[in-house]
Image (cartoon, helix red, strand yellow):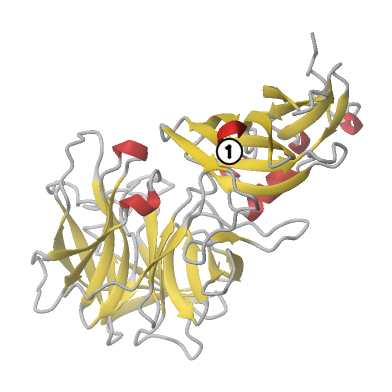
């Protein structure tokens, strides 16, 4: 019998009342049978216990990844920050095999939803070759080298992810690049991109939800590379302090209120915790080019206020600026309280009607809103719902939205982009929508398709919110589509 109960790390044994344990969840022999690899689910506190270890066949500890795998998970946004104090990425499965004469190890992260591929050619220095996204929460991994396959069993999405071996490192296609921050010793963290917009040639911008501090991310696209580098372009500050909104949409500021150095508008989703200390309103937030908050615009008091309102916790889910710059258009994810589930609302704010009060350097404003009924697709799943999750300005009074259900894997039925016009519509009218494209095949088995950007050349980029690092942050260029109108 071999014991994997060795404490970690040795240099804190005398300082900490309880040192960290590796808690291996799976083991595998190396292809030559001379070593054992353990998948270390890990301790709550000590990083080195949250990865994988290499042992001799008599149980002697040889090495571990020393936190390197978690740092790479941060770089590729497969690190669930909310799990930092609770076992991190949780490596739950491991297998080994020889492919093309190369001894390889495959380890799966349950909480990061990825598979790490290592070369074992040099036993003293195993080399990370790449990180590959899987379905949601892989628990097991199986190599079938005679078929050139590796398969993961993904618990939460109820899927199998099948990888086919090729004679080189996999490179993502240019139209579905791999998002990652710069390869440094301590990679810059990013996650939860919940809105997209075109910023400039070769660049999109995005905004995270409340899984991360509010920032403007810059994503480089259109380069002949399988990587799309991500960096924090600007941290967002409110009265010179780090802001923490629930960003669910972003638009480059082309409005009539744009400052000399334009920045962005973001849509911050509220939480509908009426009457509670933690109540957060739905807000449209104007940000200057340096990341400073200029304005916050609220919904009418009877719809969203600390005392109560019609809006539910599924509120703002995107923002667009009208072509003339006079209006902001916002999709409400789900129906107002007391209204039928088959309709939600598209809200339109007239920027010419604002009245504001000062809160330090920030103007807190209200204005005139119109609300249009938007008909949602039907669902036969009584435990699910369908709602909106992004908006894109296409032309004069013309917009596109993402409509999706909240399901994963085979249960997911609706991931679509619809177009509509607000021409000649008045407050309370019902929108006529036109299906533009079904994007379900491109984003299965995931749920939160929440980013949409249009480039001047007509290319449409669609993005996935990765829930703060729990799945991949998929970005797809679906190309140029015929005008739906």
Judge left or right: residue 271 versus residue 73.
left
Q: Residue furthest top?
A: 1
Please tell me whether residue 224 is drawn above or below residue 314 in the rendered image.
below
On the image, the x and y values in percent for residue 23 come to 70, 23
| Front residue of 247 and 204 | 204
On the image, the x and y values in percent for residue 405 come to 28, 46
On the image, the x and y values in percent for residue 449 come to 37, 54
Q: Which residue is mark 1?
A: 148
> Which secondary structure lies at badge 1?
loop
On the image, the x and y values in percent for residue 50 come to 71, 34
Identify the image quadrant of residue 456: bottom left
- Quarter of the image with the N terminus is top right
Judge left or right: residue 320 versus residue 206.
left
At 30% across and 37% down in the image, what residue appears?
411
Judge left or right: residue 457 versus residue 220.
left
Please tell me whether residue 50 is drawn above or below residue 260 in the rendered image.
above
The answer to whether any part of residue 333 appears in the image is: no
Please tell me whether residue 276 is drawn above or below residue 320 in the rendered image.
above
At 64% across and 62% down in the image, what residue appears?
181
Please tell me whether residue 60 is drawn above or below residue 364 in the rendered image.
above
* Neighbours of disc 1 within 10 Å: few (<14), some (14-19), many (20+): some
- Quarter of the image with the C terminus is bottom left
The answer to whether any part of residue 215 appears in the image is: yes
């Amino acid at each position: 019998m071999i014991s994997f109960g060795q404490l970690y790390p040795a240099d804190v044994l005398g300082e900490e009342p309880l040192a960290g344990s590796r808690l291996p969840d799976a083991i595998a022999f190396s292809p030559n049978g001379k070593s054992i690899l353990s998948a270390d689910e890990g301790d709550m506190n000590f990083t080195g216990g949250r990865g994988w270890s290499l042992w001799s066949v008599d149980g002697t500890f040889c090495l571990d990844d020393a936190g390197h795998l978690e740092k790479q998970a941060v770089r590729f946004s497969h690190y669930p920050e909310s799990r930092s104090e609770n076992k991190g990425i949780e490596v739950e499965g491991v297998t080994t095999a020889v492919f093309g004469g190369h001894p390889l190890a495959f380890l799966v992260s349950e909480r990061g939803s990825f598979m790490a591929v290592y070369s074992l050619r040099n036993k003293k220095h195993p080399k990370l070759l790449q990180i590959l996204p899987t379905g949601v929460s892989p628990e097991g991994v199986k190599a079938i080298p005679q078929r050139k396959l590796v398969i993961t069993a993904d618990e939460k999405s109820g899927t199998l992810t099948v990888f086919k071996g090729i004679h080189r490192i996999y490179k993502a296609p240019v139209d579905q690049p791999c998002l990652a921050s710069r390869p440094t010793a301590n990679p810059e963290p990013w996650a939860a991109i919940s809105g997209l917009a075109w910023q400039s040639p070769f660049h999109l911008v995005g905004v995270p939800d409340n899984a991360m501090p509010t920032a403007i991310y810059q994503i480089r696209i259109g380069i002949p590379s399988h990587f799309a580098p991500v960096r924090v372009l600007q941290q967002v500050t409110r009265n010179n302090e780090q802001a923490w909104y629930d960003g669910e949409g972003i638009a480059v500021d082309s409005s009539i209120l744009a400052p000399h150095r334009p920045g962005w508008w973001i849509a911050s989703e509220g939480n509908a915790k009426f009457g509670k200390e933690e109540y957060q309103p739905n807000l449209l937030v104007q940000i200057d080019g340096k990341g400073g908050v200029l304005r916050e615009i609220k919904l009418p008091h009877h719809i969203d206020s600390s005392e109560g309102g019609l809006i539910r916790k599924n509120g703002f889910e995107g923002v667009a600026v009208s072509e003339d710059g006079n209006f902001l258009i916002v999709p409400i994810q789900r129906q107002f309280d007391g209204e039928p589930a088959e309709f939600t609302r598209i809200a339109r704010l007239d920027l010419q009607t604002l009245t504001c009060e000062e809160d330090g350097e920030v103007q807190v404003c209200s204005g005139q809103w119109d609300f249009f009924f938007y008909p949602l697709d039907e669902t036969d799943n009584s435990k699910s719902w369908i709602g909106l999750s992004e908006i894109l300005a296409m032309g004069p009074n013309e917009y596109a939205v993402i409509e999706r259900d909240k399901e994963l894997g085979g249960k997911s039925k609706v991931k679509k982009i619809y177009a509509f016009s607000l021409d000649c519509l008045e407050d309370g009218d019902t929108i006529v929508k036109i299906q533009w494209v079904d994007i379900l095949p491109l984003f299965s088995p995931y749920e939160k398709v929440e980013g949409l950007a249009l480039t001047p050349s007509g290319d449409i980029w669609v993005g996935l919110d990765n829930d703060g690092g729990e799945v991949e942050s998929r970005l797809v260029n679906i190309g140029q589509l015929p005008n739906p109108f």
